[in-house]
Amino acid sequence: MRCMILVKAGPDAEAGVMPDEALLEEMTRFNEALAKAGVLLAGEGLHPTSRGARVRFNGRGRRVIDGPFTETRELVAGYWLWQVRSLEEAIEWAKRCPNPTGAEGELEIRPVFEAEDFGEALTPELREREERLAERGKSPPGRTRT
């Protein structure tokens, strides 16, 4: 099972305050443990929303909203993608995570849909197309697999 772990933003993250060396060291050790256990698939920190944008949909309409965004408790400062055996295993790993804010913070764990979750709606043809896209996504930028 794959899970996305969302690191919720705090006021410092939204203000662009970078973590200190001690927190970077703790997070690096944690990431190394995840990698050694074969759990870590991906993970990155995100710039503050002042450097981002949203695209809002309304039927066929689209509207671009430039950051920053104010609802800090709902914003994401970073993420991991983990391969785990169960939600319980993901929770155990999350409990081992250094506190990313040093104050009150939160990690959100969300299972990722797998192909079998879509049942018959994911026809063999659609599954094949999705698999080709996934393989292309594994290629280095600017290069496609043949």
Image: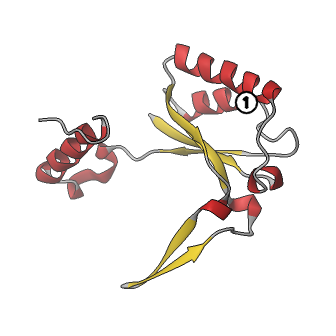
- In the image, residue 47 sits, relative to residue 43, either above or below, namely below
Tell whether 81 sits left or right of 67: left
Tell whether 46 sits left or right of 98: left
Q: Position of residue 78 (x, y in %)?
A: 62, 45
Residue at position x 59%, y 31% in the image: 90
Colouring used for the render: secondary structure
Tell whether 133 sits left or right of 9: left
The quadrant where residue 65 appears: bottom right
Residue at position x 22%, y 58% in the image: 121
Residue found farthest to the top: 36
Residue at position x 75%, y 46% in the image: 106
Q: Position of residue 34 (x, y in %)?
A: 58, 21
- In the image, residue 138 sits, relative to residue 59, either above or below, namely above
Q: Which residue is mark 1?
A: 95
The answer to which of 62 and 116 lies nearer the viewer is: 62
Residue 83 visible to an observer of this rendering: no
The quadrant where residue 43 appears: top right
Q: Quadrant of the N terminus?
A: top left
Total number of numbered labels?
1
Q: Say what amino acid the circle numbered 1 marks.
A: Lys
- In the image, residue 79 sits, relative to residue 71, either above or below, namely above
Q: Position of residue 123 (x, y in %)?
A: 16, 53
The answer to which of 91 and 36 lies nearer the viewer is: 36
Label 1: state its secondary structure: helix
Residue at position x 59%, y 27% in the image: 89
Residue 53 visible to an observer of this rendering: yes
Tell whether 135 sits left or right of 6: left
Q: Position of residue 146 (x, y in %)?
A: 11, 35
